[in-house]
Image (spheres, rainbow, N blue to C red):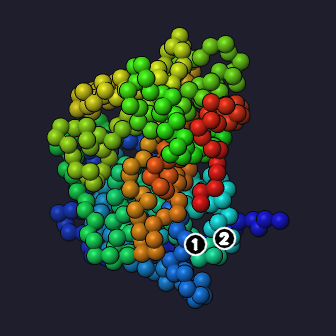
Amino acid sequence: MDKEIKVEVIGKEPVKPSTPTPNHLRSYKFSLLDQILPVYHNPVVLFFSSSNPSTDDPHTIASQTSQLLRKSLSKTLTKFPQIAGRIRENSSVECNDEGADFIETRINIPLSKILKKPDLETIKLLIPKSNATKYEVATACMLAVQANFFECGGIAIGVCLSHKLADASTISTFINSWAETTSESGNEFEISQLDALSLFPPHDSLASRPSPYEAVIEVIEESAVTRLVFNASRIAALKSKVAGGIVKNPTRVEAVIALILKCAMEAKRSSSGRDHHCPSVMYEAVNIRKRLVPNLPEKSIGNLVWNYAVKIEPENEIELQGLVSLHRKAIGEFTESCEERLTWEAICRHSSEMNDFIKSGDIEIYMSSSWCRFPFYEANFGWGEPLWVCLGSMPTKNFVFLIDTKDGDGIEAWLALSAEEMTFFERNQELLAFASLNPSAI
């Protein structure tokens, strides 16, 4: 009989910056994009084979590694003073050096047991809080870390970083900076503390009230979660199927998102017993660093992400080429008017439309976020690059999350749907021609 996983908490303590934050950096003002993003901690888990492959006592090695991680985290926080602070209303972070939570655990199973058959409910045990989206605003750490040590010597580092401060790019930059500090490689990881206030001035009306997008995250329904892996050869075949006619040179993300959305909409129709598709909208997150003029540095810190809507009318025949074409049209229109869409007035219209869609109940809302091409797999703490990187939880139903496979050529996708819809989704033969359902991560 398989051993039941047990997570033993060895210790929990705050980790503060190694040097005090200078007075002139003690207040981090929110930009408009920081203000409008909901209070949500993005949880990510990085799995490593071993910090020390020697035959020494594994508990001793775990204690030494944990101490090393805490020390290097303390040094890293000096470069990111806002991450060691606390939110003051919806207007700023007081960079008071209260620090991040650091939790050390022991896991009673080998790492391979999790990697051979990944399960989100098990993975949730490896992040600082299973309800990572529910941190209280006033008292919450901006960052919480959980270092999990397996009986085989393997390690899983769970990181929860507040979306009020960090998008996927910033999370990746922070983790890589921490890894470089831990490994003492001598390579200074480049970061850019951007003055986002001048680009996106905050709005006074948001200072004392929640983001208008809180309602979107609060609509969290019970859902089933599946994991799909598209390897390089299957992505090539999928892109070949999508290409032609109105679609030239589809990207791998375009092709994968289109297939998942098509199959999800078909599952919705089948589970509802309808003979037609209902109107649907997919909100896709987009990194705006390279869409602003002039472009922003790749490692700019903060929230430099927004979303655009891909609208699918019920009379539209759902074909892959058509979905990619709608996606390209939407992203093209967004890029052409990027700065105009990030004004206070435009954001109000956008959030109002989204909330109207949700309240109507007649439109199926999907959301997607791609972390592809962010260098999570380059995070080397001194014991090699990660074996596997994954999200620690799914924020809401109808959410699609994409990330690179370790080789950088494939895509791993996670999807949350209602349990009934998932039954139809996972049996879709078009999907199964290109994706593997929850294969081993190693």
Residue 44 place in picture, x, y as percent: 49, 56
Q: Is residue 108 left or right of residue 244?
A: right
Taking depth in this image into account, of 251 and 196 the one nearest to the observer is: 251
Q: Report the residue marked by disc 1.
A: 154
Q: Quadrant of the C terminus?
A: bottom right
Instruction: Name the foreground residue: 441 vs 67.
Output: 441
Measured from the top left, where is residue 208 in percent x and y?
Answer: 34, 42
Circle 2 Cα neighbour tier, 10 Å, few/some/many (<14 / 14–19 / ≥20)? some
Q: Residue furthest right?
A: 1
Going 65% across and 44% down the picture, which residue do you hit? 437
Q: Quick one: SS at disc 1?
A: loop
Dot 1 or dot 2, earlier in sequence: 2
Can see residue 47? yes
Mark 1 neighbour class, 10 Å CA radius: few under 14, some 14 to 19, many 20 or more: many
Q: Residue furthest top?
A: 315
Q: Left or right: where does residue 7 sit relative to residue 24?
A: right
Q: What percent of the width, then of the height, locates residue 206?
A: 32, 38
Q: Looking at the image, is 208 positioned above or below residue 427?
A: below
* Distance from Cα at disc 1 to Cα at disc 2: 7 Å
Q: Quadrant of residue 295?
A: top left
Question: Decide: marks 1, 2 in contact (CB < 8 A)?
Answer: yes
Q: Describe the element under mark 2 as helix, strand or loop.
A: loop
Residue 354 position in % (x across, y down): 44, 26
Which amino acid type is shown beneath numbered disc 1? Gly
Q: Quadrant of residue 118?
A: bottom right
Residue under label 2: 110
**Residue name at image x 32 percent, y 76 percent:** 185
Q: Residue at x 41, y 69 (%)?
A: 380
> Is residue 397 rendered to the left or right of residue 404?
right
Q: Name the amino acid, label 2.
A: Pro
| Residue sitting nearer the eye, 284 or 142 | 284
The residue lying toward the viewer, choosing from 167 and 227, is 227
